[in-house]
Image: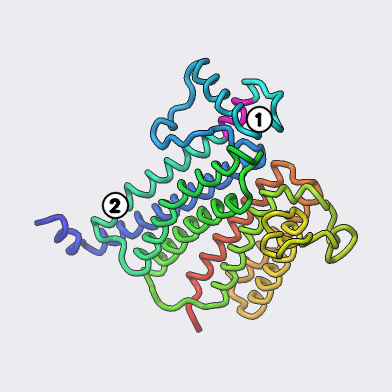
Amino acid sequence: MTFVSSVLTASPVQRAASRSSVLAWLLVVAALIFLMTMVGGATRLTESGLSITQWKPISGMIPPLSDSDWQAEFDGYKQIPQFKLVRSDMDLSEFKGIFWWEWGHRLLARLIGAAFIIPALWFWARRDLKGAVGKWVLLATGFLALEPIVGWWMVASGLSERVEVAPQRLAAHLLIAAATYGAALAGAASFSNGGDAAPRARAPAALALLIYCQLGLGALAAGLRAGRLDNTWPLMEGRWIPGSIFPGAAPLAAMITDPATAQFDHRLFAYVVVIVASVLALISKRRGAVHLAALAWAQAALGVTTLLWSVPVPLGLAHQALALALFGAAVWHWRMSPAP
């Protein structure tokens, strides 16, 4: 009996085991992406992302092993504007502290690639990825392939003329990671529904999209360090609409160049997310919608606290973690909500 025919004639018990394996794999991949995003957030908050100035997909897995290796890495960092203009007093021991964050982030990304690709090939060969699940896995594959390219494009923006990465590239990097995470969860939810490809409700999909957009606005605010100004709430500069936003620039340009505008946009969109989540909970009265609304309120409260404390690293990471958890919950709720 050939391998393919053995798959096609698998017993119900074997098929159930295969389904459980695929579901566990997708959930593990989503968890690893969540972890990688948190390490990436720590890398950003500690301003460690430019400590490795070269992209070495294979040899870069091995960290410096000797004093000369460490000195070579440090010498490379000394050539970029961030060191020359901001950290010229840094010594080698301090450099090692930021290096390990970026190296760990890149290593985890490689591990996720292996944890995704190898099982995916196995499940495709066994014809376990069909219908809606297969489409979500293909989508996640595309995002996962794009992510390291965008990641290096982001890092490169801070190596020659800037002292930090470009905020719009930071946002793109986070959004692709979030899209991969969401696709993995959507595939897992589809598997939980027996591979159901039936239409899903539109309102939960709209909420998931709103939260996804809010993730991007949060990344722009983070890239511009917008959380470290106007640390008051609910007013900014003593006003509901501060006069400093959109300073002589087109609205879209101001979103990626002006910290006050980025913070205002992030605040405003947070209100939209909370209102929409609350309305959906009241209308649908589904347990998942109620839980999602409660999570949105918790995230808003944490965001306000993080702002009032000027974004200390622990609160900043907690805010990012809860944002990603909210997005994941929204995706799961959407995929589990059939159209009326």
Q: Secondary structure at mark 2?
A: helix
| Left/right of residue 231 with respect to residue 217 in the rendered view | right
Give 24 or 178, whichever is nearer the viewer: 178
Extreme residue in the right direction: 238
* Direction from residue 268 to residue 126 in the image, left or right: left
The residue wearing badge 2 is: 121
Return the residue found at the far top. Answer: 67
Seen in the picture, residue 184 relative to 118 is either above or below; the reply is below
Q: Which residues are magenta?
A: 95-101
Residue 233's mark? none
Name the residue type under label 2: Leu
Tell me if residue 153 comes above or below residue 323 in the rendering: above
Farthest bottom residue in view: 340
Comparing 248 with 109, the one in front is 248
> Quick check: 314 above or below 334?
above
Q: Is residue 96 magenta?
A: yes
Magenta stretch, main secondary structure, is helix
- Provide the residue designation for mark 1: 83
The numbered mark, 1 or 2, whose residue comes first in the sequence reads 1
Image x and y of residue 87, in percent: 69, 29
Mark 1 residue element: helix
Seen in the picture, residue 73 relative to 110 is either above or below; the reply is above
Instruction: Estimate the spatial distance between the alpha carbons at disc 1 and disc 2, rounded to whole Å.
Output: 43 Å
Type of the residue with mark 1: Phe
Where in the figure is residue 306, as x and y percent of width and height?
75, 50
User: At x 53% / y 33%, what residue is drawn?
Assistant: 53
The 10 Å Cα crowd at callout 1, few under 14, some 14 to 19, many 20 or more, is some
Taking the magenta stretch, the answer to whether it contains residue 64 is no
